[in-house]
Image (cartoon, rainbow, N blue to C red):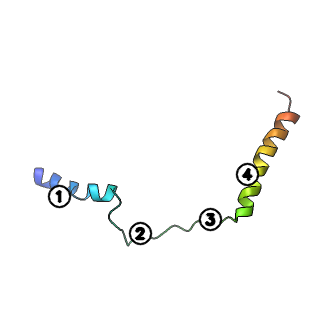
């Protein structure tokens, strides 16, 4: 039983440290958002929150 443990635990430190490269894994396509859209969303969200705070009675 100890030989099985040694065999399976030998790869764990290398995998957890990111030292092994897996060539079979394909990269996931990322959503590409232009920087201007990101800035506009960042400005629009607080404005909408402030407007809702002022317009909706609590």
Residue 54 can be seen in this image: yes
Q: Earlier in the sequence, mark 1 or mark 4?
A: 1
For residue 24, what is the image quadrant?
Answer: bottom left
User: So how many labels did they put on this image?
Assistant: 4
Q: Classify mark 4: helix, strand or loop.
A: helix
The circle drawn on residue 42 is 4
- Identify the residue at image location x=77%, y=56%: 40
Q: Which residue is mark 2?
A: 25
Q: Residues within 10 Å of mark 4 (few under 14, many from 20)?
A: few
Q: Which residue is mark 1?
A: 7
Q: Give the percent coordinates (x, y) of residue 42.
A: 73, 51
Q: Earlier in the sequence, mark 3 or mark 1?
A: 1
Contact check, label 3 and label 1, Cβ < 8 Å:
no
Q: Give the percent coordinates (x, y) of residue 29.
A: 55, 68
- Identify the residue at image location x=73%, y=57%: 39
Tell me the distance, in whole angstroms, between the alpha carbons under discs 2 and 4. 34 Å
Tell me the distance, in whole angstroms, between the alpha carbons under discs 1 and 2. 23 Å
Contact check, label 3 and label 4, Cβ < 8 Å:
no
Left or right: 41 as drawn, with respect to 16: right
Q: Which residue is mark 3?
A: 31
Contact check, label 1 and label 2, Cβ < 8 Å:
no
Q: Earlier in the sequence, mark 3 or mark 2?
A: 2
Q: Residues within 10 Å of mark 3 (few under 14, many from 20)?
A: few
Q: Give the percent coordinates (x, y) of residue 15.
A: 31, 59
Q: Earlier in the sequence, mark 1 or mark 2?
A: 1
């Amino acid at each position: 039983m100890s030989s099985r443990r040694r065999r399976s635990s030998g790869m764990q430190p290398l995998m957890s440290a990111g030292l092994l490269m897996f060539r079979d894994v394909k990269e996931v396509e990322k959503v590409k958002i232009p920087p201007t859209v990101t800035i506009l969303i960042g400005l629009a969200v607080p404005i909408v929150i402030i407007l809702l705070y002022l317009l909706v009675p609590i």
